């Protein structure tokens, strides 16, 4: 009797093991998507990754193409931006992710992703440098490009009048950053924008600066079916800023973003789609106004 019971128990264990094995084969564990944050080069924006995202959308990846401060749809004036602002923006993105992320840095922003990895080593799974700067400690971007030859970006590089930010001549942008892509392709991805700026002296120590930016973006599809219900309509954004700056190092600014209060989505990324644009993009900021006071020491 005891042998029969032992035999039945053994058979039961084997049967349970077989059933469990079959069940595991029927429902394989779903792999978690790896989050990849794509960081554009200087003077460009998250829009530069549109074709890259298209080619990778079927992989097990969650792709985020961010606009750093002062780039793409972020219209923060360049003279109010520091490297720490770039770093803080990326840290905010990776801190919002549950698991470590992959950071891809293009060109200048190889420097930025390196700094982010130093500050958040446990949140960064891998760094990928795409023709990007990887500079040793104690050096800088300027020392890295000093004396460089054959670079259209370096040849057309110059500093603003107050030396607070760097620029590349408008007429050289295409050849410097996307010479192997037709110009119409760049314009189609980036939309178009217009800007007005005015600056004049109020007194010997005070200056007035005014900015007005108008940008438009075409219809965006967030699902490969290209159905009308899977799109965000074309939209335009109007931003403005006025600032009074002092030669003694302080600046008082008044600003407004999305002055027409457009409803829109930004930072398109083909993520886990279930029927809403919220699955693949961020809601844009509504009408926002504010003031800021800054000091340079």
Image: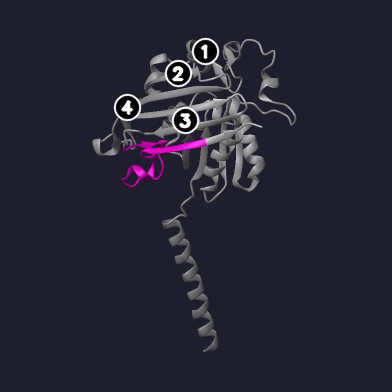
Task: Return the disc, 4 or 3, that comes first in the chain's sequence.
Answer: 3
Task: Return the disc, 3 or 2, that comes first in the chain's sequence.
Answer: 3
Identify which residue, 222 or 288, lies in the foreground.
288
Query: In the image, is 225 to the left or to the right of 257?
Result: left
| Residue 179 visible to the viewer | no
Give the label, 1 or 3, closer to the camera: 1
Q: Which segment is the magenta one?
A: 263-292
Q: Are marks 2 and 4 in contact (CB under 8 Å)?
A: no
The Cα–Cα distance between marks 4 and 3, rounded to whole angstroms, is 15 Å
Q: Which residue is mark 4?
A: 218
> How far from the left and from the top, in percent, is residue 274?
33, 47
Question: Crowding at label 4, few (<14), some or many (≥20) Cα neighbours within 10 Å?
Answer: some
Query: Looking at the image, which residue sits at the far left?
Result: 228
Identify which residue, 288 or 222, lies in the foreground.
288
Where the C terminus falls, by quadrant? top right
> How far from the left and from the top, in percent, is residue 192?
37, 21
Check if residue 264 falls in the magenta segment. Answer: yes
């Amino acid at each position: 009797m005891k042998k029969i019971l032992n035999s039945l128990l053994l058979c039961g264990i084997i049967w349970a093991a077989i059933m469990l094995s079959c069940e595991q084969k029927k429902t394989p564990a779903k792999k978690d998507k790896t989050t990849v944050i794509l960081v554009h080069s200087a003077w460009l924006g998250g829009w530069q990754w549109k074709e890259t995202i298209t080619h990778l959308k079927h992989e097990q990846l969650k792709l985020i193409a961010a606009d750093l401060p002062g780039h793409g749809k972020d219209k923060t004036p360049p003279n109010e931006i520091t490297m720490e602002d770039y770093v803080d923006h990326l840290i905010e993105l990776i801190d919002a992710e549950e698991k470590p992320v992959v950071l891809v840095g293009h060109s200048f922003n190889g420097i930025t992703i390196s700094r982010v990895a130093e500050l958040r080593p446990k949140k960064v799974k891998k760094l990928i440098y795409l023709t990007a700067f990887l500079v040793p400690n104690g050096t800088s971007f300027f020392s890295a490009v000093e004396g460089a030859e054959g670079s259209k970006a370096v040849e057309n590089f110059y500093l603003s009048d107050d030396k607070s930010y760097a620029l590349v001549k408008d007429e050289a942008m295409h050849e410097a950053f996307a010479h192997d892509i037709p110009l119409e392709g760049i314009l189609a991805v980036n939309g178009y924008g217009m800007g007005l700026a005015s600056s004049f002296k109020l007194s010997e120590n005070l200056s007035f600066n005014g900015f007005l930016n108008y940008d438009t973006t075409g219809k965006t599809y967030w699902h490969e079916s290209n159905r009308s219900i899977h799109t965000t309509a074309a939209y335009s954004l109007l931003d403005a800023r006025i600032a009074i700056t002092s030669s003694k190092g302080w600046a008082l600014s008044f600003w407004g973003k999305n002055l027409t209060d457009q409803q829109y989505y930004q930072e398109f990324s083909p993520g886990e789609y279930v029927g809403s644009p919220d699955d693949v993009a961020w809601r844009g900021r509504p009408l926002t106004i504010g003031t800021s006071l800054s000091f340079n020491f």
